[in-house]
Amino acid sequence: MVETAKKIDANTFAFFTRNPRGSKAKQLDETDCKEAIQQMQQAGFGKLVAHGAYTMNLCTAKQEDREFALQVLCDDLQRMAYLPGNYYNFHPGSHVGQGLDAGIGYIVDALSQAMALDYPVTVLLETMAGKGSEVGGRFEELKAIIDGVGKVNVGVCLDTCHVYDAGYDIVRDLDGVLKEFDRVIGLDKLMALHLNDSKNPFASHKDRHECIGKGSLGLDTFRRIVNHPALAEKPMILETPNELPGYAAEIAQLRQLYGQT
Ligand code: FE
Ligand code: FE
Ligand code: ZN
């Protein structure tokens, strides 16, 4: 992964800790992890942003399914100890009709248990589009989880497609949205970004990613994002519908936008 990232001029990347649509995980190779760390140090990489499985729903209705999700989370955090000091980001979950407060309670319980062993990882809750019964479409919901867990190594990964779909207008008022983030959660908790354009209009609650500059956010929004002082030095991860050459082109494009104010 590190070698591939270097080839496309990236200095961070995301990876799935296991099959994102299942739950199976490959055995980790300790020697390989050590070499990855060394290569990343040499190349001046920033922090990585690992992504949990989409199927891991910590606040699902059935208790046995929640217990399975918790096991997956514990195993992921333990695996992150092979790459100490990096980020692990995941979708808070969908409360599937039990109500927001119950959902937040389950997520807090699970995270508190999984983080009790203090693995060397910072856990990032992702801002969601608010599709169906998704938790995390409002900053207040993420704040409630962060406060409920009460640990310093819990933060937020801001997904540009998701927040726009959720009804935070980063196209017309990026400053205003970041001020709102600061008021509700605190900008010190904003630790990484997912850079995605959106296939859908503002506040659509849909969550369909588009390539950078080709959707409703537009290139100018990304120009403002990569140059915003509050977002400087944060890992920015592409989750656009691309293969490697497309990612290489988007990284080059974003690097070109950097400095154009
Ligand atoms: Fe995500
Ligand atoms: Fe995302
Ligand atoms: Zn998404």
Image (cartoon, rainbow, N blue to C red):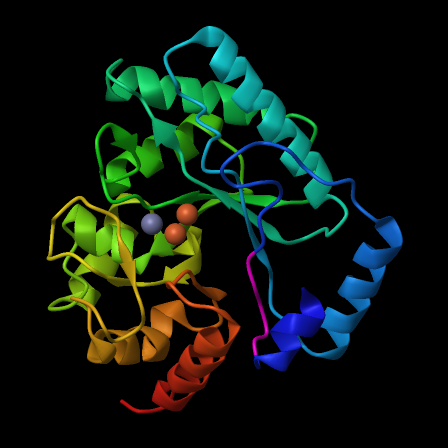
Q: What residue range appears in magenta? A: 10-14
Q: Is residue 255 left or right of residue 227?
A: right
Percent of width and height locating residue 125: 43, 42
Task: Give left or right: position of 222 versus 14.
Answer: left
Which image quarter: residue 61? top left
Place residue 33 in its image quadrant: bottom right
Q: Visible in this render: residue 113?
A: no
Residue 254 placement (x, y as % from top left):
39, 81
- The residue at the point 54 percent across, 14 percent down is 67
Residue 93: quarter of image: top left
Looking at the figure, which quarter contains the N terminus? bottom right
Residue drawn at the location 61% of the way across and 41% of the way down = 18
Judged by its main secondary structure, the magenta piece is loop
Instruction: Specify the quadrant that holds the C terminus.
Output: bottom left
Q: Is residue 146 above or below residue 233?
A: above
Vertically, is 116 above or below 214? above
Please tell me which residue is depicted at 34% across the width and 37% down the height of the picture: 142
Q: What is the x, y in percent for residue 48?
A: 60, 59
